[in-house]
Amino acid sequence: MQDRNRRASSIDGFAPRKPASRTIGFDAMKKPPEAFPGVGVTLSSYKPSTNATMSNRSFELPNPMQPYTEAPPRTKLKKSRVTKKKIAAIIVILLLIPTVWLGFKLFHNLGKVFHGNVLGILGTTKLKGEDTGHVNILLAGNSADDPLHQGAQLTDSIMILSINTKDNSGFMLSIPRDMWVDIPDYGHAKINETYVDGENEHFNENGYFPGGMGLLQKVIEQNFDINLDYYGLVDYNAFRDMVNAVGGIDLTIQSPDKRGLYDPSIDWTTHGPLVKLTNGTHTLNGQQALDLARARGDAYGSYGFPQSDFDRTQHQRQELLALRSKATSTGVIANPVRLSSLMDAIGNNIKTNFNLSEVHRAYDLTKNIPGGNIQSLSLNDAHGKNLLTNYTAFGGQSALIPAAGLDNFSDIQVFIKQMLSNNAVSREGATVVVLNGTDTSGVASKARQSLSSKGLSVTAIGDATTTQATSTIIDLSGGKMPATKQLLQQLYGNQITTTNPYPAYTADFIVIVGTDKLPKATNTTSQ
């Protein structure tokens, strides 16, 4: 009978309790009966003897007179719940990591380049020159850190960047590296030597930047009659690294040679030709952009560089505008990796006298200037006029001097003043021919006086072949001089054509004054 009542799962013939409170013996009772003292022992109360061995174990039973207590229930581990709040917190942390890193990068690199406390970037300070309407920045580039480049400290790239603070415009003017100038205490030399001379003599004069950039500032201000407010000295590596940081720049090659551009000079980085580009749009990486900025096309077998160094400086200005456009695009601003690389390129390769609060102000002034409102200027094509001429210096050096003569910078100064004018018509520098389309004499002469007083350059006057009842404007500017066109329309009406029936005259605009612009009391008696 006992075998029938035993459960299969029992090791002693009795039904066991739950493992957490199992007792040996009479497990159906909460307490062992007094008749069997010491029998109701729980598993947890067994204590092996200190003399126990693997072959001979003895167990000490608890005192039978102690009151019985059940073993405490087993504690259950709480399961961790992944809530929406936890997920959101994790996402926020992940988003903050790149933000904090970029913030560190920003302040680290800003501190390396600009003066003042890094927290100055949070405020703004009025810029020097802002009250006059123009902030002028001297930019110079060299290869000071390039051990393979002979004359690495020579500033082969010199440029003036002027920001018009009144009407969201500006211009970039390249100064040829071969310009022959009088360097104080050194005599006449090419202008690209000036920075090195200033660094060697530790130039330091009141009113000028310190070191080589200060001596270069003095030479330009004295000859060009322009105030320079800030400077930026850029190692060529910065340009290469910045182009790479933004993922390359798009540049359209429009060489007068149908084959494009080719300069077989060796690029010692790639061991290929310095430049080989077809006409059309190309995406240039940093090394390609740097090579194009250096190429003059003066090596044997070159093509597409008819103006040599002038072509080089033109490409530099084009590339700077392309870099500005790419760096301010959403694809770069919203990309932490590209933005971080761009900060590193700036921090490692640029020196300037801007402080951080001035940088903030400069950004506010320039962020709304469209790329098309920044004119690219060269002294060999100042509104169609070459202000430079070739010069052979002592020792047979080939150089450039003002077309007006050695050390005569008067025409260049007039051109720069024109570009610094707050009058958009004056800045465009359009040339105008006036023809008399009436039977009244003196009409063209009076028109020339009126237009000259408004800042226009009237290069010739004459008579039209026929009398016209309505004044006509012939626009030959190619759409590049909108302010001048608007002024002429206000004065002579809206009858405009781009067809020129007077090929003997070359100008940006030809104005034929018709009888509709004659005073009503005037008698039409003669031409």
Image (cartoon, rainbow, N blue to C red):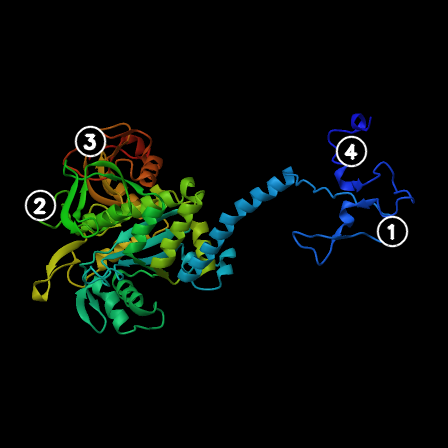
**Foreground disc of the pair 4, 1:** 4
Q: Position of residue 280 (x, y in %)?
A: 23, 35
Q: Upstream in the sequence, badge 3 or badge 4?
A: 4
As measured in the structure, the alpha-carbon distance from the residue carrying label 1 to the one carrying label 3 is 128 Å
**Foreground disc of the pair 2, 1:** 1
Q: Callout 2, which amino acid?
A: Gly
Q: Upstream in the sequence, badge 4 or badge 1?
A: 4
As measured in the structure, the alpha-carbon distance from the residue carrying label 4 to the one carrying label 1 is 24 Å
What residue do we see at 83% from left, 38% from top? 27
Circle 3 packing at 10 Å, graded few (<14), some (14-19), many (20+), is some
As measured in the structure, the alpha-carbon distance from the residue carrying label 3 to the one carrying label 4 is 123 Å
Q: Position of residue 254 (x, y in %)?
A: 21, 38
Asked whether residue 166 appears in the rendered view, the answer is no
In this rendering, the answer to whether 212 lies above or below 281 is below
Give the numbered dot on residue 13: 4
Residue toward you, 451 or 388? 388
